Image: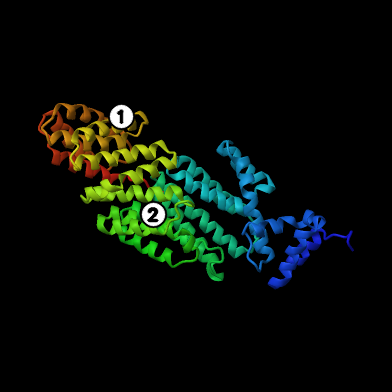
Amino acid sequence: MRQEHLTKQEIRHFVEHEHDEIELKLLLHHLAVCPGCYAAGGYILDLYVAGSLPAKFSSIDLDLARSRAEAPRLYARLSGLSFAKQQGLLKDIRKFRSWGLAELLCAESLAAAARDPGKALELAELAVLLSSLLAPWEPVEEEWLFLLRAYAYAHLGNARRVAGELRSAEAAFITADEWWEAGVSMGDVLDYEAKILALRASLRRTQGRFAESVEFLERALGANGAEALRPEILASRAFTLGEAGDLEGALRAFRDAIAATDRTGARRLFYVLHHNLLDTLSKVGRYEEAHALLPEIAALAGETGDDLDLLRFRWIEARIVADVGNRAAAVAQLGEVREAFLGRGLVFDSALVGLELAALHLTHDEHDPVLAIAEDLLPVFAMEGVPREALAALTVFCRAAQAKVATADLAVATREALENANNSSIKR
């Protein structure tokens, strides 16, 4: 018997039958001490040690965990290929029909959204395609597969939202709801509901339907899977309150989200929350409190290793510096930030900074610098998707600047009109 080892088929036969925790523990122990048996089924022990399997697991738990563990390797094969070739691999190569890969494509779509909306959209479309290609019992039953399709369509809706395609985003969420209703009779066995509700809330926020957005977020906090997403859901609630104009509520919500976020495990979210806390403090006029936080948040910005994060931090820093009395330093810093945004092709952000800079100049009746700022605002008129009201406000300001009759209040009002059109605080 010492020379006989379990085969792959025998190990599979064992896990396909129901066992209690003690029996499963004996299997794991056997895999740990017998190299021959480990060669046949060691992946089970590896998944358990990695925390991917519960103490009492089924063959479905095992298959899902293995699929998720193998997904990064498959994703690496897809990366760098054209979208058409990626679609072809999913359709033609059997090993790419992976549940874990579908979930990973959704996660990568979310990660890409802030930096590359086009890529985020492609990744979400791949997730939807892959979920449509999976058949029942690959590796789970049909109702679970319906939930995966709902999950993929929700991410497609989010990617369309980020790309500014709000009508088609709404259509994707309607499809997600249809798949969800078809599969949820067994319950939310995959803990997808909290994420889907949070993504739906983001669409409502972008649509300006703030009360509905908050309602979806409250539902998300009570749904399956909420605990792992709690910091992100609280962050989204803070963003929504801020955009709705409830800045004091947003301050409280940002602090709640910061308290719920692990600095080491979610470093970027931790910074984003502090950035937006600082931004909101500056907007409600609590400049001394904001000024006291500058060193800590500057250090956090440096830790992210993102030049754009640091640039946005310097924008808020200049605003705070101006309001605590160092106008000359603020003017110089805002000018540098504006030029940096222009150099990156971030016309909208450059326009917002320029209007803040114009307000500082106009408080001292300095009209000549404002003329140059007004000229740099002209590219905004060529941008797609800028609301008519924002363009009208910008037109009034530019004409006033050319006539040297612009005021600081007009610059502030114009900036607020543009900011309402496209809130530029860092979001995840």
Asked whether, in this view, residue 300 is left or right of residue 185, the answer is: left
Q: Residue at x 89, y 59 (%)?
A: 3
Q: Residue at x 46, y 59 (%)?
A: 229
Residue 390 visible in this rendered orientation of the protein: no
How far apart are labels 2 and 1 at the CA level? 31 Å
* Label 1: few (<14), some (14–19) or many (≥20) C-alpha neighbours in 10 Å: some
Q: Quadrant of residue 11?
A: bottom right
Q: Please tell me whether mark 2 or mark 1 is closer to you in this view.
A: 1
Q: Which mark is residue 326?
A: none
Q: Nearer the viewer, residue 23 or 87?
A: 23
The residue that label 2 is drawn on is 202
- Coloration mode: rainbow
x and y, in percent, of residue 312 in the image: 33, 40
* Upstream in sequence: badge 2 or badge 1: 2
Three-letter residue code for mark 2: Ser
x and y, in percent, of residue 96 in the image: 65, 47
Three-letter residue code for mark 1: Glu
Quarter occupied by the N terminus: bottom right
Q: Is residue 8 above or below residue 86?
A: below
The residue that label 1 is drawn on is 339
Give yes or no for contact between labels 2 and 1 (Cβ–Cβ under 8 Å): no
Q: Secondary structure at mark 2?
A: helix
Asked whether, in this view, residue 115 is left or right of residue 145, the answer is: left
* Label 2: few (<14), some (14–19) or many (≥20) C-alpha neighbours in 10 Å: many
Q: Residue at x 13, y 30 (%)?
A: 366
Q: Nearer the viewer, residue 48 or 368?
A: 48
Residue 108 visible in this rendered orientation of the protein: yes
Q: Is residue 350 above or below residue 168?
A: above
Q: Residue at x 78, y 59 (%)?
A: 33
Q: Nearer the viewer, residue 257 or 160?
A: 257
